[in-house]
Image (spheres, helix red, strand yellow):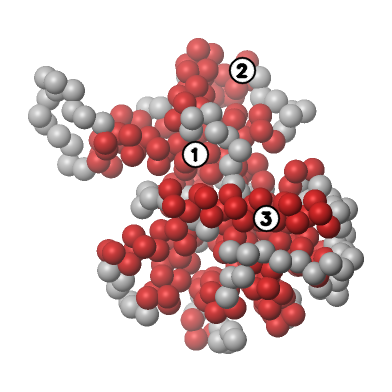
Amino acid sequence: TEVKMAKRLFFSPSKSNAAGVKFGKASFDLLTDFLVNLDKRNKDNLPSSTKYCGNFKNKRVIGEYFSILSLIIIIIIIIFARFMVKYIEDFITAPTPKGATSNRPRSYEDAVYNKLKDKFPLIIFSCVQLANKLSLHSHMIDNNTAVHFLHSVDCTVSKQALLESELMVLKGLKFRLNVLNPLTYVEILLEVLGHNEPSVPMKHLYHYCHHVLQFISLERTAIYETLLMTTTERVSPSREQREQFVPVTEDCMLLGVGVIAVAAFILRKWEQVVGELSHITRISKRSITDFAHATLVHIVGISSSVTPLS
């Protein structure tokens, strides 16, 4: 994916949490470096995608623990999902110890559940702590506060157990916490869009992007299933097609342009925005349209109520 920008003055009054840079304040060279770096990291990340990647980002997990979506919540979800995927992969590939019982569980899911069911709340909280340390440097959660909070929700743990859980997550991630997150892609793409198309109402677009990203995060499974059926032109895609589709579900650049495109459709700025997004990212208009349509179908709730996009 080649990324491009037009050398014109850019405008956006909104604030960004990405790397401490405010919208409209980054220089052309810095913004270009941001975009090229994000594009490279996104492409480098896609080959390692596995079929387990989306299992811990679905509505059941997110909706149970988080009622709002912000940058730190997104980071928590990504850290948690990455750890669980790595844990399951290691569990599946680990050889059975000599002398171990031959009574195998009904499924890997049962085996993982049995092993983690008592640790699960603590793993979630460890992901919260790690995201907190990455994002809120002036409001750290100290261990005394953490233990007191966990006790208040009937999860009795010691400081040592808390530290061991956090270390387990860190080791599972090989201490690599600088995670890709879709909100950063949305914000940087909006920066570039505002640079190239100053007439776009960036403040309103950014506002709607937050709501669209939250909706997509909560309805992730259903939206990507619709997109899979659209791209394969099959109501029941084959197993091979599903496996080939996995990198699409982990493509942050596609998700970023899709979020902005849906917000642009809501603001009636579709034609103005989508062509420029395609120019910036080299993602085809057809792919952006398919993603936006798959999302809008679920926002509206009835496919026939969504005017076909072109």
For disc 3, the marked residue is 36
Does residue 165 sit above or below 258 in this rendering?
above
Residue at 63% x, 15% y is 144
* Nearer to the camera, 238 or 212: 238
For label 3, the SS is helix
For label 1, the SS is helix
Judge whether residue 92 can be spotted in this image: yes
- N-terminal label among 3 and 1: 3
Residue at 74% x, 80% y is 272
Does residue 37 sit above or below 219 in this rendering?
above
Contact? badges 3 and 1 (CB < 8 Å): no
For disc 1, the marked residue is 80
Mark 2 residue type:
Asn
With 199 as the anchor, is 310 left or right in this view? left
Task: For label 2, count other residues whose C-alpha is less than 10 Å away and answer few (under 14), some (14-19) or many (20+).
Answer: some
With 43 as the anchor, is 265 left or right in this view? right
- N-terminal label among 3 and 2: 3
Mark 1 residue type:
Phe
* Residue 35 percent across, percent down from the top left: 70, 56
Quadrant in the rendering for residue 268: bottom right
With 188 as the anchor, is 103 left or right in this view? left
Residue 143 bears which disc, if any?
2
Mark 3 residue type:
Val
| Quadrant the C terminus occupies | bottom right
| Quadrant the N terminus occupies | bottom right
Measured Cα–Cα span from mark 1 to mark 2: 20 Å
Measured Cα–Cα span from mark 3 to mark 1: 27 Å
* Residue 108 percent across, percent down from the top left: 25, 41
Task: Please count the marks in the image.
Answer: 3
